[in-house]
Every structure is written in C-alpha cells, then in structure tokens.
Amino acid sequence: MKRVTMLTGVSSVAVLANDVDESAKWYETKLGFEVSAQGHWVTVRPKGSGIVIHLCGKCEEWESDKPGGNTGIGFSSDDQRKTYEELKARGVEFKQDLTTEWFGTYAIFKDPDGNEFWM
C-alpha cells in the first residue's frame, strides 16, 4: 500500500473583510497582531504564532458569502481576565463578556466586519 504524506498542521485560516487595509490596521492596533502584506495577500497573527489569519478582500469567489458571524476561531491567553480587560480598554467590542461555564472560561469578541472570535 502506498503511503500518503500526512498533513501536519494549520498554516492559515481565511476571514472575510470588506476593507483589508482597514481590517489589518484594526488587528494591529486593537489586538497587537503582526501584519504582513504582499500585494493582495494580507495576513495578521498574534506575535510569534505560526498560524496566520488571511484577510480575504471582496472578490467574485465570495459569491453570496459575506463577512460576519462566528468564525469558530479561538485565541488562547496566558491571563484571560487581564487580556479581556485590556482589549475592552482598547475599544474591542465583545458579544459575550468574560464568563465561566462548566466547560471553561471564555469571551467572544468581534472585528470591524462582525467576524466573531473566541478567547
């Protein structure tokens, strides 16, 4: 039987953005992310992360898709309470304030396009 090369990780995830430049600036100033722009390929990531978010600007491939809603992407933090308070102070909008449930402590915040992220 021929061996198949295995996938070994995630390198990027796509998030739709109405204005890529505006979104990149928000991720940089509000979340402290690193920004990389090479032509139309714009990515943001937490400092030191190997996984990037590819900000996808409006194009024909979107078809009827649009930005906004739960991305399913979660970010980790070494101090959730402190991170939550700092992001709120920077003007980040939270859909769900920091709360503790049976499965753990979390909050949900939104980017300028309404894309929702967990922390």
Image: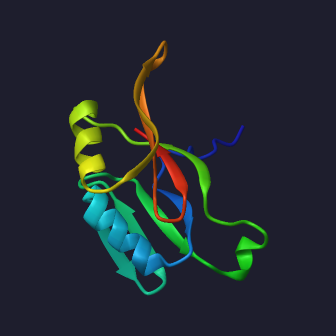
Residue 31 horizontal/vertical position (percent)? 30, 56
Residue 96 horizontal/vertical position (percent)? 47, 37
Identify which residue is drawn at 63% across, 41% down.
3
31 above or below 81? below
Residue sitting at the far right: 64
Identify which residue is drawn at 48% across, 49% down.
10
Task: Locate residue 46: give its quadrant.
Answer: bottom left
Identify which residue is drawn at 73% across, 81% down.
60
Identify which residue is drawn at 63% across, 45% down.
4
Residue 28 horizontal/vertical position (percent)? 29, 66
Say if residue 75 shows up in the picture.
yes
Would residue 108 appear left or right of 82 to someone viewing this image? right
Frontmost residue, 48 versus 57: 57
Would residue 78 appear left or right of 8 to someone viewing this image? left
Frontmost residue, 42 versus 67: 67
Task: Locate residue 105: give its quadrant.
Answer: top left
